[in-house]
Image (tube, grey):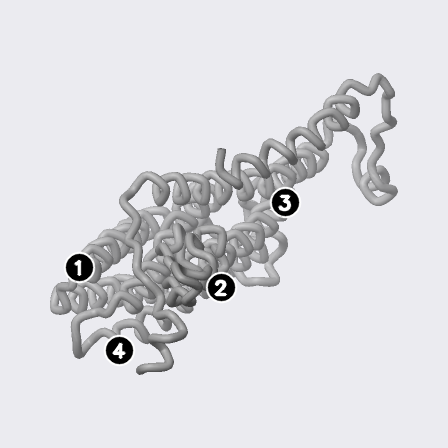
């Protein structure tokens, strides 16, 4: 039974009513409509609501430390690289566009375009993580470590949690790409790609919030 | 009137009056921080107090924002489903299931 069982309409009684001349009428078929929202979509939205609260907790901690310190960032720690991160933001936003294109291709049943756009999304997501990793290495060499006070701890907690989510989305994307590489996507697979796309858009939108908050 | 709207009206009817009475209550309550906050902060002008206040307000607003967003999305999806032509299909009856 679907979670959105309110959308299921039973128009006919299950028990057959007596027909003419006392003969039992054959049982009428049940009529069912498509649910307004699929279970998978509801599950992904609930997951994202929990993720949003998780990041809200981290952002709350960041706000306490940032507004509670007169000098932020502390003078002895390196500044965050703004130029490269702007470029990296562009990379992640571009991956959002390719994911939207993949979603459109899956709905239209275009298998080749779907595979191509999923590949581009995976490449751009991986590039985003690689640039992040190289920047972190440089920051660690300049003394900004996880134990370098509240500044380092909140920075790595926030941006690291986001990077972990991008990595998780990449694994999910790889599994979807493997499932859909050989044939036209079935309606079930289109639903899975929709769920992945919702998650990917969330990760992209979250990065814009974190970028504006942490790198400003 | 469909069942959904009827249920909403019933809930508002039952909870509306108590909510109005609570909101109109003239009692003043004493606002105070916990012991840790009181000892850690030197006063309302303390930057840490400003940070804590901002963070508390932000965290307090998030559940409301999320519930409102998810509720608005679900309402939109259900209204859209009601207005679009239904993709109705028939489930097999018991007799048909027995034949197959």
Residue to which mark 2 is pinned: A15
- Between circles 3 and 1, the one closer to the viewer is 1
Q: Earlier in the sequence, mark 4 or mark 3?
A: 3
Q: Which chain is home to disc 3?
A: A
Picture residue at 68% right of the left edge, 34% below the top: B53
The image shows residue A113 at horizontal and vertical percentages of: 13, 64
Question: What is the quadrant of residue B44 in the picture?
Answer: top right
Residue located 85% across and 40% down the image = B39
- Of residues A39 and A12, the one nearer the viewer is A12
Mark sitting earlier along the chain (2/3): 2
* Distance from Cα at disc 2 to Cα at disc 3: 66 Å
Looking at the rendered image, the disc whose residue lies closer to the viewer, 4 or 3, is: 4
What x and y, as percent, mark residue B55?
64, 39
Is label 4 in contact with label 2 (beta carbons under 8 Å)? no
Residue count near mark 1 (Cα–Cα under 10 Å), binned few <14, some 14–19, many ≥20? many
The residue closer to the viewer here, A17 or B21, is A17
Q: Are dots 3 and 1 on a single chain?
A: yes
Q: CA distance from mark 1 to mark 4?
A: 16 Å
Q: Earlier in the sequence, mark 1 or mark 2?
A: 2
Q: Which residue is mark 3?
A: A65
The residue beneath circle 4 is: A178
Front residue (pair B26, A7): A7
Q: Secondary structure at mark 2?
A: loop
Say whether residue B16 is left or right of residue A213.
Answer: right
């Amino acid at each position: 039974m679907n979670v959105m069982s309110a959308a299921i309409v039973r128009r006919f009684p299950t028990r057959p009513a007596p027909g003419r001349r006392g003969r039992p009428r054959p049982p009428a078929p049940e009529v069912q409509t498509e649910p307004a929202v699929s279970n998978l979509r509801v599950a992904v939205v609930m997951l994202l609501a929990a993720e949003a609260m998780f990041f809200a907790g981290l952002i709350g901690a960041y706000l306490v430390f940032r507004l509670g310190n007169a000098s932020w960032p502390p003078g002895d720690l390196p500044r965050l690289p703004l130029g490269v991160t702007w470029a990296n933001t562009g990379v992640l936003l571009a991956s959002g566009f390719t994911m939207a294109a993949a979603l459109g291709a899956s709905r239209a049943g275009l298998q080749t375009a779907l595979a191509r756009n999923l590949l581009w999304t995976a490449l751009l997501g991986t590039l985003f993580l690689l640039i992040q990793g190289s920047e972190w290495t440089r920051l660690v060499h300049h003394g900004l470590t996880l134990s370098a006070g509240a500044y380092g701890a909140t920075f790595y907690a926030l941006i690291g949690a986001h990077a972990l989510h991008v990595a998780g989305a990449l694994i999910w994307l790889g599994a979807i790409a493997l499932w859909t590489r050989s044939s036209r996507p079935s309606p079930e697979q289109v639903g899975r790609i929709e769920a992945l796309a919702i998650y990917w858009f969330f990760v992209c939108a979250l990065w814009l919030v974190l970028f504006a908050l942490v790198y400003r | 009137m469909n069942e959904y709207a009827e249920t909403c009206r019933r809930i508002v009817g039952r909870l509306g009056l108590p909510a109005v009475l609570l909101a109109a209550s003239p009692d003043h309550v004493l606002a105070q921080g916990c012991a840790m906050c009181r000892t850690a902060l030197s006063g309302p002008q303390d930057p840490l107090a400003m940070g804590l206040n901002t963070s508390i307000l932000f965290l307090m607003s998030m559940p409301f924002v999320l519930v409102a967003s998810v509720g608005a999305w679900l309402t939109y999806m259900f209204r859209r489903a009601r207005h679009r032509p239904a993709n109705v299909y028939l489930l097999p009856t018991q007799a048909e299931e027995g034949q197959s």
